[in-house]
Amino acid sequence: MTLEKEQKKNNLQKVFEVIKTMASKPSGLIGLSILLFHVILAITSPLYVPYDYKAIDPSLMLQAPSSEYWFGTDSLGRDVFTRTILGGRTALTVTFFGSLIALLWGGALGIFCGLVGGKIDDVVMRIIDAFLSIPWILAMLLIVSLLGTTTLVLIPALGFFYGKGIVRVARAATHDVIAKDFIVSARARGHSNLSIIWNEILPNVRDAIMVEGAMRWSWMLLGFSSLSFLGFGVSPPTPDWGLMISNARGLMSFAYWAVLAPIFGLSSLIIGINLTADAFAKALGIDRSTKAPV
Amino acid sequence: MLLLVLKRILLGFITLFIVSLITFSGVEVLPGDACTTYLEREAYGAALEACYERLGLNTPAHERYISWAAGVLQGDFGYSLSGEMRINDVLGPRVKNSMVLASASILIGIPIALLLGIITALWRDKLPDIIISTITIFSMTIPEFISATLLILIVAIWLEWLPGIVIVPTGASISELLPNIILPVIAISMIMTAHMARMVRSSVIQVMASDYVQMAILKGVPYWTMVFKHVLPNALLPAINVVALTIAWLLGGVVVTEVVFNYPGLGRLVIESISNRDLPVVQALAIILASIYVSINLIADLMTLMLNPRLKSLQIKK
């Protein structure tokens, strides 16, 4: 009992230490603060938005920014400030759960393949390679256009598609530890495969997989907003940055504010997640600078 | 060596075969088929039967796959759904347009990326590195459609230097295309350059820290001789593979960029065919894009193999 408690305390301490290391460099601190800001905004913004995000009023069409409408209004007379601060909610939720799914299935399959090896591993890796060679956008568009654009389709679809890269990372990390002495001795002690995975392999590959998952999160956000931008993501009138940019793009020679506000929102969130993921990787001592974005 | 090359090519073909199976069965498994999407609400009774008959959809799936695959192997993708045109005729000009865009971006992007990567590595953590690295991080993290939209807003609308949107017909000649592709090329090569420059940078830094470079420094080899003779050849070799993966990854980004600039290439065809639910065209596009991906990787593998004497006698570690 006390031992378990101690272990828990140790784990918590480790988490704090990692966060402290991340925040000790300016880029990590900036990334963490941007991410935290966006998360807080996403959770609390419905409480204090000044206007209704779907209230259409033709008499207020394309108003320039003023003290009343801070970021102006869009072509349907909706308040751009309201829609911008609400615009990250769907994106953050979908991509967060999407990356969680990607992390779980990618990590599990990767560890399994790395451990089993042989024919099964060969076949699975060939299939993963094939999936990697289909451009993500084509596959996502096909799935979404045939199954619909609800969040219930988008989350598993994104989670599935961004998990295949994690399979490779998890497999490589497993390969690195599989020949180590402690695994050999665990086998000699007669531990089952499941116990070896849980107690010996997982603690050693966890860091690599988590860093990869954090990186996937920012790519998934990029993919998700590209889908929204192309009209295959969330459906209107849901406020979403990608959708807002694509709607306001046609009129940007006149109403540039309606484009710039969501651009600022989305760019800052992606940069925030990226800086955080980079700092996370560095805090855990993993170098990802030579990796390709696949 | 020859055996290794042959094995690589065979693996590429196996990958493409699996891709064709995935796309074919994906279209098969997902709800709706060519006829129900084409006829929409009238998809019942005699009309549906006639459509199945016309498109040959009433034969079993594996027979259709074999005849489709046989056609693809001979370079024939069959007929598109909406216009009942030959897919080859639809694809031809699009492939050419996208090739023009891609090769221009690569030709401009790679030299700049090499230069920036080498500069940032040699002046590591000094002012040039900090400035360039910050810019590259920004341009590689911001989504393509945002940088493209910003480019149009700033260069085309505010400064009025260049046209913002491409208005050329699909079958335009290269000389008609060229003045129009400046902004799209900047948008694509910006992201590509940023990715590559970062990889070149870390690769050069790694080699600079190696024993043989330290040795060369101790022997008193002049700095630039050392850089060009000892560092660069060794640093650029591992970068080739990563560069290839980056180019392939950008295929997805090119789709978005083409849509933003209204450029009549493969990317816009992807969106158009999916909006029209033109599944035969989607299948053809999947195969074509996957083949581009596989061949770029293959070329990179072969180049690494050829340039690296150590690998000539070795099996490549997968």
Image (spheres, rainbow, N blue to C red):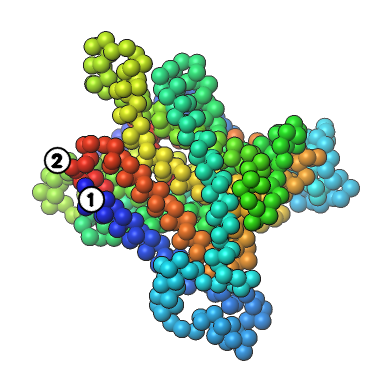
Residue highlighted by disc 2: A181
Callout 2: chain:
A
**Residue drawn where x is 60% and y is 67% of the image:** B277
Residue A58 in the figure: left or right of residue B306: right
Q: Quadrant of residue A2?
A: top left
**Residue drawn where x is 31% and y is 18% of the image:** B226
Disc 2 crowd, CA 10 A, few/some/many (<14, 14-19, 20+): few
Q: Nearer the viewer, residue B21 or B84?
A: B84
Callout 1: chain:
B
Q: Nearer the viewer, residue B12 or B93?
A: B93
Tag on residue A194? none
Residue highlighted by disc 1: B2
Closest to the camera, between mark 2 and mark 1, is 1
Q: Quadrant of residue A160?
A: bottom left
The Cα atoms of the two marked residues, 2 and 1, are separated by 38 Å
Which secondary structure lies at badge 1? helix
In this picture, is B190 found above or below A88?
Answer: above
In this picture, is A131 found above or below A62?
Answer: below
Disc 1 crowd, CA 10 A, few/some/many (<14, 14-19, 20+): few
In this picture, is B305 found above or below A135?
Answer: above
Residue A42 in view of the camera: no
Q: Where does the image place residue A119, in percent across and percent down from the top left?
A: 22, 60
